[in-house]
Amino acid sequence: MKKVAWLPASLRGGLQCAQYSQTTASSNFPRRTVFTLPKKQFSTSSSLQESIAAAPIRFTNNNAKEGEEEEDPVFNARLVPNSASYFTAQPIFTDDLLSLQNLLQRYANLPVLKPGEAPRVAWLSLADYRNIVGETVKAAKYSKIVEILHRLNHIHPSLMPREVKDVLNEYKRDVNPYQNTAKPGLVNTDGHALGAGRRKSSTARAWVVDGTGEVLVNGKTLIEAFGRIHDRESVIWALKATNRVDKYNVWARVSGGGTTGQAEALTLAVGKALLAHEPALKPALRRAGCMTRDPKRVERKKPGHVKARKMPAWVKR
Amino acid sequence: MILRNVAIRHGRKALAGPIQKSLLRTLTTDTLPPQEIAALEHTILNHNKETLSIDAQFNQLPTTRTFVAPVKRSLSRREVRSRFHKRYQIKATTDKLGSEIDPYYQPHQLIIDPPKPEDVTLELLMASQSHLGHSTSLWNPMNQRYIFGVRQGIHIISLETTAAHLRRAAKVVEGVAYHGGLILFVGTRAGQGPCIVKAAELAQGCHLFEKWIPGSITNGDQILAKCGIKAVDMHDKEVEGYEEKIAEWSALKPDLVVCLNPLENYILLHECGLNNIPTIGVVDTDADPTWVTYPIPANDDSLRCIQVIAGVLSRAGESGQKKRLEAAETGKVTWLPPKNLGNPVTEEDRKRAAEQKKAKRMLGMAADGQEHTRGTRGRNGDIDYQSDDL
């Protein structure tokens, strides 16, 4: 809002009115323009006073001035900031931080869990918090809040105060990703365990049974199904790395992609099925690379390129 | 063992049932070469011998013979809770036992219950190290009149001056609070946060314990645009009806700034100077006292000293606010409302304005219609509502 001091009694303005009185009377201009004052102000103090919260102190004059004051009774209201953190430019964030610090100070004596034993919680991300608060909070500043939340989360659950629980819930993400745990594979009544794996554009399913080391891929033996020795080895790599080639039979279906993709999709499938039989093998299988899905795919071709990255040859003219 | 022998020994009975999983797994076709097996067995034998000999030596020691390894058992929830409560019960019963301790310095007490301006004594100032200045080589000669002398290469600030200036500053804070001004407490050094927040709480002002954003006063409309303000009446109750005014109102400016570390906040003090805002500052022997309006010569590097000064000023602000509210109870308003704020807009006012606008529009339409009949017949009846509103 433009706060132009309104000086109706200004001599300059009066003179101007007098000067242009004839033209204004005849023309159809809106009235407002006639009384517009020159923009330059002669006192700097009047513009300053307006933006300061409280008006200057009016010292009481004992002379008979009471009659004048009663002319326009103005409601007594003054403007104050909503929050004491007004001048930090991030009042909501600062208030949040202070209230959390208060809470921590109040409950600092409660027994805590050992580091790492507290339930894992995903706190609001920085972007979420910024959206909720509507202030541009820096990451380093938000990390202070997260630090306090982490400490509060370590209060022993048997003595966790209701108040702290409510505050922690406010800062929790709607979905807790740490509650998502992979389902363990199952061995059915016939002793079959099914595992599925993918690589590039191949998809594989493998049924692993107790046996003597026979492998059938799409009804063919390993030697018939894969020409390369490397591929044959990758199919049964999970069994080979754990020294169990001769203890299980594998029956697998695989589709899509080429030979390498199919073979490595089978690695994953066989590994997962083997895990259903012997869950204790997980670290060994992970080290052998039979648990991790390789997310690489064929990169798409781009316009202006010959392939995904290749540029057409440069020709002079 | 060879499979054939199993069949011969146990006959039909052994083969009748289904073969167990574990049995199948032991049937390995892979075998290591005999030399490697021999080498492995040898190493295992060696290893066993060594460990046995070490064991024997240890077990002869008297302490290890009776040693029982501790079993780590995590406490149950109930146990944790009962132990916690028990600890507090014991503390409550035994806390008062023993010798009586004389009053002693408790750091948190300065923040929980800060001293009042009446409590300021030279002893308190001395105890809080407010007399310690900087090395004589760092001094600012402008501070000459605040300096008591030199001791061990540092300047000693005169405590009488400190006390006098502190009392004067307390009066200023009290007066500003009494006249409804907005007081801003600034202390941006590490560790000054808690006392600043407490001071702002007592004096009902604002606090700033992180970096001053340059331009918050001179360019407040941009920087503090998102920070909300409200209108309050003489009893500090929020008043409705100013929403439209507030939405257009420019950013607030403090009426008094208390700066506990002027050396780091030159920009803030400069902005205050540009806007005729009085400032109170703690001036050490290396600072320039002309940066602030009301200097308090004291040691700004001691947190304890800063806590005493902030506490005294906040108590002064508290009493000012209290007096203002007491005056308001008797119907006396100690401040003037800001210019152009006017009266609150009530629901009735809004209705009346809308009715007036409507009536005006109707009148305008009627006048326009009359003009139609008189002369401008060829014109289409375009009614310019905009001009009517003027």
Image: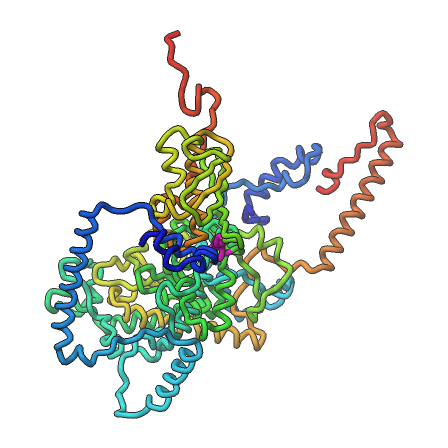
Residue extending farthest top? A317
The quadrant in which the C terminus of chain A is found is: top left
- Whether residue A183 appears in magenta in the rendering, the answer is yes
Q: Which residues are magenta?
A: A176-185
Which residue is located at x 51 percent, y 61 percent?
A: A170
Looking at the image, which residue sits at the far right? Answer: B373
In the image, residue A262 above or below residue A173? above
- Is residue B345 found left or right of B63 in the rendered image? right
Tell me if residue B319 is in the magenta stretch: no
Tell me residue A136's x, y (percent): 46, 49
For the point 50% across and 35% down, which residue is it? A219
Q: Nearer the viewer, residue A244 or B133?
A: A244
- Residue at 37%, 59% (x, y): give it: B9
Task: Tell which of A81 and A45 is nearer to you.
Answer: A81
In the image, residue B343 lies at what x, y percent? 64, 60
Q: Tell me where residue B164 appears, x and y as whole percent.
A: 29, 73
